[in-house]
Image (cartoon, rainbow, N blue to C red):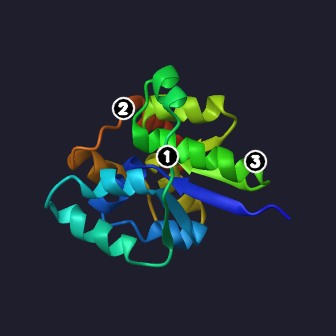
Amino acid sequence: MPKRVVIADAGPLIGLARIGQLALLPRLFGTVTVTSWVRQEVLAGGDFPDTRALQEAFSQSWLQMVDITGNQDLINLHQIDMGEATAITLAQQLHSVGDLVLLLMDDQRGRQAAQHSGFTTMGTAGLLVLAKKAGAIEAVKPLLQALHQKGYFLSQRLMDAVLIQADEAL
């Protein structure tokens, strides 16, 4: 029987940490896997309020780290960073043994590369919609606004589409 594996890139981890919602990940998925490159990317930002939440998450059993080398061809072909490349490479390895993989990724080029490789992707905004549908949060709009206010880039078009999916459009 195939195993479902959720692999996160840095973006969703950082976004959820900024709004104090990292706990949604284990609630929605149980276990989330990251590569050592993603861990390094997430924690390399220096000493800011979110760093403590991220460091704490990495000390918990729901966030598992795998050491893997990125595929340079992915980086060159899709112009993505090493974190995205290692996440996709890990997804390819797990898929090859029959696992079902969901990639949590915000960067548009990274998502396109993952989808080009046949993987389902979900970004931070989509995670919030899923959390609402699962009853883990009451509303998406205030969390989207909080992300935006804390400097997380979300286009107006994306926010409008997400609010429609969450049944919160005006």
Position in image of residue 150 (x %, y %): 21, 50
Q: Secondary structure at mark 1?
A: loop
Report the residue marked by disc 3.
96
Q: Amino acid at mark 3?
A: Ser
Label 1: few (<14), some (14–19) or many (≥20) C-alpha neighbours in 10 Å: some
Q: CA distance from mark 2 to mark 3?
A: 37 Å
Q: Earlier in the sequence, mark 2 or mark 3?
A: 3
Q: Are marks 2 and 3 in contact (CB under 8 Å)?
A: no
Residue placed under numbered mark 1 in the picture: 69
Q: Which is nearer the eye, 139 or 7?
A: 7
Amino acid type indicated by mark 2: Gln
Which residue is denoted by mark 2 in the rendering?
Answer: 156
What's the CA distance linking mark 1 and mark 3?
Answer: 16 Å
26, 38: nearer the viewer: 38
Q: Quarter of the image containing the C terminus?
A: top left
Residue 125 % position (x, y): 45, 47
The circle drawn on residue 150 is none
Viewport quadrant of the N terminus? bottom right
Q: Nearer the viewer, residue 155 or 166?
A: 155
Instruction: Name which residue lies at 81% across and 61% down.
Output: 2
